[in-house]
Image (cartoon, rainbow, N blue to C red):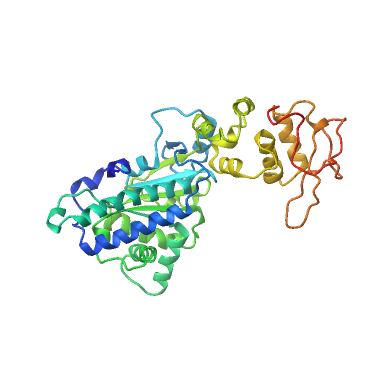
Amino acid sequence: MAIADSIKLSGPLSNGLRSKITPQSLNWLYTYFSAVVRQEDASADYALSPNLKPRLARLELAPDGDYAEQIDRLYAEAPTGPAKMSVADVTAGNGGSILLGKSGSGKTRQLHDQHSRLARTSLAQVEQLRLQSDANRSDFAPVFLPVYVQMPAIASRIADLERAGNRGNLFQSALEGYLSQQAGSPVPPGLLSEVVPVILADNLEQLDLGQAPVFFSRFNQWFSTITPEARVIIACQHLGFVLYYPWFRPDQQWQFFGLYGFEWPEVRPFLGSRYSETELDQLELTGLTGLFIHPALCKLFTTGSSARSGLAGLLDIFINGILGGNTANARKLAQYSQLLGDDFFATATIPTAPASPASAPQINPAQPGATPSNPNQQSATQAGAIQPKGDASS
C-alpha cells in the first residue's frame, strides 16, 4: 500500500527536512513496526468490522475550550457537508489535532486503527529501503513513526525524569524510553530526526492536573521547536477538555474534530447475521437504531450472549445487562418502545433467578415494589430470558 493511502504529505514535510535514515535506524524501525503490527493484531477488536468508521466533523474554534454544545449538535442533527472524513485525513492535513467525543464514541478504536495502518505501511516501506544500497536512499518518501501512547503514562514518565534531575527535552526522552520498551532495544541516536513522528495520544481527560503544567511545557517545547513537522492527535472526552484547553498554544494552530458514531446505513449490513430483515425494519421504525450507531453499544449488542436471539435477545441484554434488572427503568424503556405490543406484559415470562451479591438482580415483577403497567399482569413463574408472546419477530 502506498504511503499516500494512509497519510498524505503536506506542510513542512514537503520541504525535505528529514535526514537520511541510517542502516542502524532501518533495522530498529523494522523491529519496532513488526512488534506494533503483532501487538495490534493480538489486541484487535474484531467484534465490529474494521470498515465501520465513526463520523468525524470539524469543529469551530471555541475560545473557552467548551465543545459540549457542538458535540451535542452533531448527535442531534443529520450529517451534512462533504464526504465523510477519516482519522487518516485528520492526520494528513494538520500538524496538531484534537479528537473530541463522548465516552464510547470510538476515539480509542480509531487511534489504534490508525496506529496499525501506519505501522503496516511504514513496515513495507522500511523493508524496501533495507533492500536498497545506501547510495540509492537519497530520494524517498518520509517514513512515518506512529506511536500510540496513553497520555497519563507519558506524563508520568516525564515527571519521573524531572524528579531524577534530567535536563534537555524531557518529552523526547520520555518518548524514546517508551519506544525502546516497545521495540525491546534502545532507540538509535538521531532516529527522531530521520522519521516523521505521528503521536496518537489517548485519554487526555485522565491526565493528572497536577502534572499538566510540566507535561505541556515539555511537550510544547518538543512540538514547536524540536520536531515541528510531527503529527499529533490527542483524544479526549469532550466534557473534560475544557480543563486542559489553556495549555494548548494558539501558534500551534490546533484543529478540533468531533467524533459522533456510525451511520446506520453502514451498520445495518453487518447486523444481518443476528437480526432478520423484518427485525431490522422494526428497529428503524422504533428509533432503536441509536443503540447501534454508538460504537460501544454496537459492540455490546452484537457480541453479548443472550438466551434468545433477535429482538427479544436485544431487550434481554439491555434490561438485564445494562439496567441491572431494574424493574422500573425496564418498564419505562418498554413503554417507549413500539417493539412491544399491548399484550406484552400480560404474556411475558420474566426471569426470577435469585440475586447474589456478585451479580445484578434479574427482573421479577413479583418482587415488592414492582408495579405492573397492566392490571392483568401475570406473575413470573419460569426462569429464563424475556419471552414476549409469539416468535422473535413479533
Residue that protrudes farthest toward the bottom in the picture = 164
Horizontal side, residue 276 vs residue 240: left or right: right
Report if residue 254 is visible in the image: yes
Whether 252 is drawn above or below 134: the answer is: above
Residue 68 horizontal/vertical position (percent): 52, 40
Q: Residue at x 24, y 59 (%)?
A: 193
Quadrant where the image shows the C terminus: top right
Q: Residue at x 38, y 56 (%)?
A: 36
Whether 101 is drawn above or below 144: the answer is: above
Horizontal side, residue 149 vs residue 325: left or right: left
Residue 7 horizontal/vertical position (percent): 31, 43
Whether 319 is drawn above or below 32: the answer is: above
Horizontal side, residue 228 vs residue 310: left or right: left
Give the total of numbered labels. 0
Residue 239 horizontal/vertical position (percent): 53, 46
Report if residue 148 is visible in the image: no
| Residue placed most toward the observer, 74 or 320 | 320
Horizontal side, residue 188 vs residue 307: left or right: left
Residue 283 horizontal/vertical position (percent): 62, 29
